[in-house]
Amino acid sequence: MIRPYLYFAFLFIFFMASCSESSNADRNRTTDSEAQAQPLDQDTAGLAKAVFAGGCFWCTEAYFERLKGVEAVVSGYAGGKEPNPSYDEVSAGRTGHAEAVQVYYDSTKITYQGLLEVFFATHDPTTLNRQGPDVGKQYRSIVFYSNPQQKKQAEDYIKELEEAGTFKNKILTYVQPLRKFWPAEDYHQDYYRLNPDDPYVRSVARPKVQKFESNFRDKLKPEYIK
């Protein structure tokens, strides 16, 4: 039989441990939120912005950051209603968000149309909620527009691709307004460059990026031309 004072001592220890875990979790959430608030280390004032979702953002980010005229790319989440989504929540399909990238670009060097052309050439817009080995709504194809001009350009370009028979199957890319873009955690930013030995990067991302560099050689920044 457990003595009363031992029983209450046990309850006290359990309570303190639980509070400590809760406090640590709160600090982690605060840290993630603070990390998401300042994902850039450069001035993007005056640059145009575009947001796309085309599968794993590690690949999508790597494509766009190689383009002449693109000054910065941020990996993140868009398309859902839940605030402050985390990678664990999004990748598990527990939110309505898709992995996306926000592209900051100099419109005098590359146009929104040029970005659209790269976007549709670097993923499969005909697969529903899937890109290669990545399956789920978080990998759906989306063009997020910020103004009527972007919306019209995206819809017109999709129509052009359909009429030209560019893809064997129907394009399933969503064209929808950007409500909110949430930057992903710091460790996802520039992931392709910083994690060359990651198994996914080596087996999935690297072949795609190398193919992109070959097909879009004339659009690459000088440092990416081999």
Image (cartoon, rainbow, N blue to C red):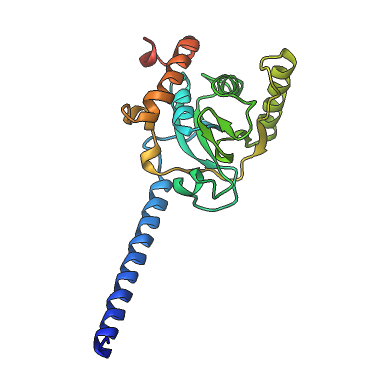
Indicate the quadrant where residue 98 lies: top right
Residue 160: horizontal and vertical position, in percent? 72, 18
Residue 20: horizontal and vertical position, in percent? 31, 68
Indicate the quadrant where residue 135 lies: top right
Foreground of the two, 216 or 12: 12
Residue ID at (40%, 38%): 188
The quadrant of the picture occupied by the C terminus is top left
Q: Left or right: where does residue 131 sit relative to residue 172?
A: left
Above-or-below relation of 167 to 76: above
Residue ID at (35%, 27%): 193
- How many numbered circles are shown? 0
The quadrant of the picture occupied by the N terminus is bottom left
Tell me, yes or no, if residue 50 can be seen here. Answer: no
Q: Left or right: where does residue 73 sit relative to residue 135?
A: left
Specify the farthest residue to the bottom.
Answer: 4
Tell me, yes or no, if residue 222 can be seen here. Answer: yes
Residue 122: horizontal and vertical position, in percent? 54, 21
Foreground of the two, 3 or 163: 3
Residue 80: horizontal and vertical position, in percent? 59, 47
Specify the farthest residue to the front.
Answer: 1
